[in-house]
């Protein structure tokens, strides 16, 4: 009897670890699909996702993992650009790069505070900004950013409000997945994304 109980426990442990591994693989695959850019020829429809024809998932990650994905995305985006920049996620969002000023390039450093919007987009509100040792108005520096730094189509630079608007709900994602931000608390390392997976993208036709 005891031997049979041990066999049952061993079998349940085996199933548990198999299920856990599958969940980790699926979540990692979804995150890669979210942040990897697609070609302009495969732009999905911008129509609002029909909640009745999709499933919704919450994916949680860490600052470190998201930082790696964001910069991999930027490397791909800026592959043929003369101007490069990177993002560092710590207690805030730190943009580091260079801007062409007076026939040379000058180091750029901007700290942003992320503000999640009700629709799942996020605003990066400028906290501090510097362009080398030049004493320029913040709005002027952001005008240079808007002019010279390549940005994804879903990112809008607003010099007057001194902010970036990240319309993540309009990102072009493979398989027509839609993403929105659920939580974005960098200090608490609490980052969560809501993912809508249309049934049609998986070849599924609901019977309703």
Image (cartoon, rainbow, N blue to C red):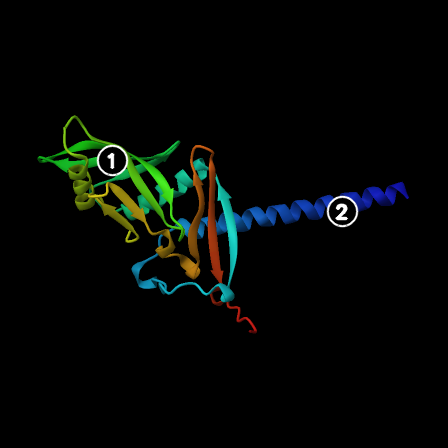
Q: Nearer the viewer, residue 101 or 72?
A: 101
Which mark is first along the chain, 1 or 2?
Answer: 2
The residue tagged 2 is: 11
**Farthest residue in the right direction?**
1
* Left or right for 176, reference 80: right
Q: Against 56, is 133 above or below?
A: above
Q: Is residue 33 left or right of residue 2?
A: left
Give how far across and how far down residue 84 sits, in percent. 25, 40
Query: Where is residue 12 drawn, in percent x and y?
Result: 74, 46
Q: CA distance from mark 2 to mark 1?
A: 54 Å
Local SS, label 2: helix
* Residue under the point 47% across and 45% down: 192
Where is residue 25 shown, x and y percent of the image? 55, 48
Residue 48 lies in quadrant: bottom left
In the image, what residue occupies the spot 40% across and 38% down?
Answer: 67
Q: Which residue is mark 1?
A: 97
> Which quadrant does the N terminus fall into?
top right
Which residue is painted at 70% across and 48% down in the image?
15
- Determine whether the residue tagged by mark 1 lies in a helix, strand or loop: strand
Residue beneath the point at 27% across and 45% down: 78
């Amino acid at each position: 009897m005891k031997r049979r109980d041990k066999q049952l426990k061993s079998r349940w442990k085996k199933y548990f670890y198999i299920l856990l591994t599958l969940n980790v693989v699926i979540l990692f695959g979804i995150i890669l699909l979210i942040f990897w850019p697609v070609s302009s020829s495969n732009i999905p429809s911008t129509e609002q996702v029909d909640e009745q024809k999709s499933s919704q998932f919450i994916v949680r990650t860490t600052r470190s993992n998201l930082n790696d994905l964001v910069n991999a995305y930027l490397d791909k985006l800026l592959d043929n650009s003369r101007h490069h920049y990177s993002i560092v996620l710590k207690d805030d969002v730190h943009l580091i790069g260079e801007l062409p000023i007076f026939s040379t390039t000058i180091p750029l450093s901007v700290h942003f505070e992320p503000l999640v919007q009700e629709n799942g987009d996020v605003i990066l509100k400028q906290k501090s900004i510097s362009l080398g040792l030049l004493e320029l108005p913040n709005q002027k520096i952001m005008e240079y950013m808007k002019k010279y730094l390549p940005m994804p189509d879903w990112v809008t630079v607003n010099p007057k409000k001194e902010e970036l608007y990240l319309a993540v709900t309009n990102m072009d994602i493979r398989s027509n997945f839609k993403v929105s931000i659920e939580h974005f608390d960098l200090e608490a390392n609490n980052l969560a994304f809501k993912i809508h997976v249309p049934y049609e993208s998986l070849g599924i036709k609901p019977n309703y």
